[in-house]
Image: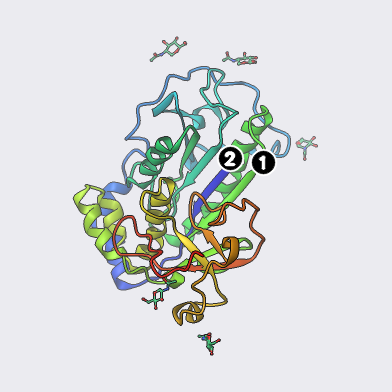
Amino acid sequence: MFHWLCLAWMVTSSAEGLAVLQSAFVKKILQQDPAFCFRPLNTSLCNDKIFQDVFSNQTADIFDPSRKTLAFLFTPLSPRHPEFLHKCDYGLPNNTLFDPKLKTEIFIHGFLDGVCRSAWMREMKRELFKRGPYNVILVDWTWGNGPNYIDSAENTKLVGKQLAFLLQNIMERGHGKIIQSVVLGDINPLGHVDFYPNGGTQQDSCRPHIVKSFFSLDFLYATISLIPRICSHLHAVQYYKASINPSKCEFIGVECPDYESFLAGNCSSCQKNGQNCAIMGMNHEFYYRPSNSPLPLFRRFYLNTTHLHPYCDNSILNLE
Ligand SMILES: *[C@@H]1O[C@H](CO)[C@@H](O)[C@H](O)[C@H]1NC(C)=O
Ligand SMILES: *[C@@H]1O[C@H](CO)[C@@H](O)[C@H](O)[C@H]1NC(C)=O
Ligand SMILES: *[C@@H]1O[C@H](CO)[C@@H](O)[C@H](O)[C@H]1NC(C)=O
Ligand SMILES: *[C@@H]1O[C@H](CO)[C@@H](O)[C@H](O)[C@H]1NC(C)=O
Ligand SMILES: *[C@@H]1O[C@H](CO)[C@@H](O)[C@H](O)[C@H]1NC(C)=O
């Protein structure tokens, strides 16, 4: 199963934001080779048979060398050295370690960020391999994600095509069936189950994380976190990461019509069998209680988080 974590966000054109983008430091990072943090697995044998049907007359722009999206495949047999799928025309090499029996998780960054520019995508991968065996694909489109925000938004269309092409190639070889998408960092209901940590706007715990990022040498992440709205959106990443291997508690969201009612304490019970609650993040397909029925569409869940890792806080919630 594909589980596509897509991070989308908007940037306010605040003076603070522009200053950060124009700093020499950010400019320097943006010029780096996007794959500088990986030594590739030796996969010289690309499979010649790639999926062509749907895109047969539209492949030119997908393969445009100046707009090269990178796709790094990690597997339990090679958790540190990825296969460079973009070097195989977005297909699997003949000698791939991709395991069709495993779930496939795909992570893609947003504006300014990049697989090697900040640490969170590699940290997600590390957490996933701690959780269990997966195919993990990290997607990098630093060729076109800034500093101009308008261009960047336009470029996401091509990135979507390139990704679709990649997924088709993988599935064409009988490697996978369901594509599921989870979008974090957008406060509009997206047609599935939506979670609103602390109401979904400014994340209080965002600021302490900036300091922590600086100390862990994740400078780009820390720097772009100085832009307030990016900071809140980036914080969804930290929640998701903490949810991969929850140690202390799960992120339990309780269904509520709006944030005001939630704050008023009108929605603080998961009710019988946990039917009023759902888990945010990696375990999102489960209700709190193990009823295991799939979630119906279009529901809003609210939850409180704490300032520091592991962020979850179920203390007031009545779990029945
Ligand atoms: C990669 O594999 C090919 C074929 O197995 C081999 O000819 C080549 O020398 C290898 N390259 C490296 C850098 O190991
Ligand atoms: C990869 O495998 C396909 C079919 O299995 C074969 O036709 C092709 O020649 C192989 N490619 C390389 C570079 O070995
Ligand atoms: C693709 O283009 C070729 C020639 O340019 C044409 O014959 C073919 O019908 C086109 N295929 C599709 C799917 O549009
Ligand atoms: C919370 O519930 C009470 C009692 O049902 C109701 O009077 C109140 O308006 C609700 N508050 C909000 C913010 O919905
Ligand atoms: C969420 O936090 C607010 C404000 O601190 C509090 O009033 C409310 O009871 C909390 N709700 C739950 C379910 O934890």
Q: Which mark is residue 221?
A: none
Which sits in the foreground, 67 or 219?
A: 219
- Could one spot residue 99 in this view of the protein? yes
Distance from disc 1 to disc 2, alpha carbons, whole Å, reads: 7 Å
- Residue type indicated by callout 1: Gln
Residue 51 location (% of width, % of height): 67, 31
Residue drawn at x 54%, y 22% is 93
Label 1 with label 2: CB-CB less than 8 Å: yes
Residue located beneath label 1 in the image: 58
* Amino acid on which the number 2 mark rests in the picture: Ile
Viewer-closest of 182 and 296: 296
Camera-nearest residue between 286 and 319 = 319
Q: Label 2 belongs to which residue?
A: 62
Q: Residue at x 45, y 27 (%)?
A: 76
Q: Residue furthest left?
A: 215
The answer to whether residue 275 shows anywhere in this view is no
Mark 2 sits near ligand 3, with its Cβ under 8 Å away: no
Q: Which secondary structure, mark 1?
A: loop
Q: Quadrant of ligand 2?
A: top right
Q: Provide residue 134's location: percent of width, then percent of height.
A: 50, 34
